[in-house]
Amino acid sequence: ATLLLAGSALADGSITLSPDGSTSTDASVRIDGQTVTITQAGTYQIAGTLGDGALIVESAENAKITLVLGGVSIKNSTGAAIQIAVTIELSEGTTNVLQSGEEVDIATATEGEEASGGALQSKVDLKIKGKGSLTVLGYLNNGIHCTKDLKIKNGNISVTALGHGIKGKNSVTVSGGTVTVTSGKDGITSDETENEEKGFVTIEDGEIIITSAGDGVSAETTLTVTGGVISI
């Protein structure tokens, strides 16, 4: 699955987000108030704003779904702004913002007992790429949270999080782009303990800037750096 910052993907359908009533050219997209649910494989061009809602992907784990973000702002006061199993592409020249919870001072605030996940959350492999910008504000827990393998190909990505900034439980691979993280726990982390071939962080290229109360980069098994510029 892939998340793209728009610019290259040809869309099968488009979704326009609005607190007054979202719309879609694809009849399979379910819209219930400020909750928009994608149920079929395909590439979706997405723009607009949700003041307190969520974009959800409900599909088979192996479904090929790409979300092309072309100027999106989603805030969810109680959970993840995007709950996905996809590729996210960031459209060139666009700014996209995902926020969970209300703004807090991460230096002094504490996580709630039931806090989990992130503002951008995926239960399967997640890929982020594109030439646009993505700001992730995780005021409930983590910023970007993937329970499988997380790959950041490029894009201008800024994460502020009460918990971990960027977490890929199985692995995190950064191969390009600019990634800036401010977090109350680890900046970038992978913590899979049951599979010796997972739990790794690999940095191949890109510029990474981390300010964190915990470890800058934490890997349960191996941390490999083959390129890029890292400031912690």
Image: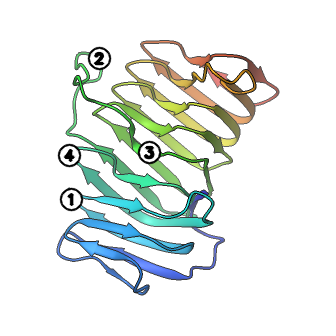
Mark 3 to mark 2 CA distance (whole Å): 23 Å
Q: Earlier in the sequence, mark 3 or mark 2?
A: 2
Decide if residue 232 is in sight here: no
Q: Which mark is residue 77?
A: 4
* Comparing labels 4 and 2, the label whose residue is closer to the camera: 4
Front residue (pair 188, 91): 188
According to the image, label 3 marks what residue? 121
Q: Is residue 6 visible?
A: yes
Report which residue position mark 1 lands on.
Answer: 51
Q: Residue at x 57, y 57 (%)?
A: 61
Mark 3 and mark 4 lie on one chain; the one further toward the N terminus is 4
- Residue 187's mark? none
- Total labels: the figure holds 4
Circle 2 sits on which residue?
A: 107
Residue 194: x %, y % from top left: 63, 21
Label 3 amino acid? Gln
Above or below — where is 63 with respect to 142? below
Please report the residue visible at 34 percent of the width from the left and 69 percent of the height from the top.
48
- Looking at the image, tell me whether mark 1 or mark 4 is earlier in sequence order: 1
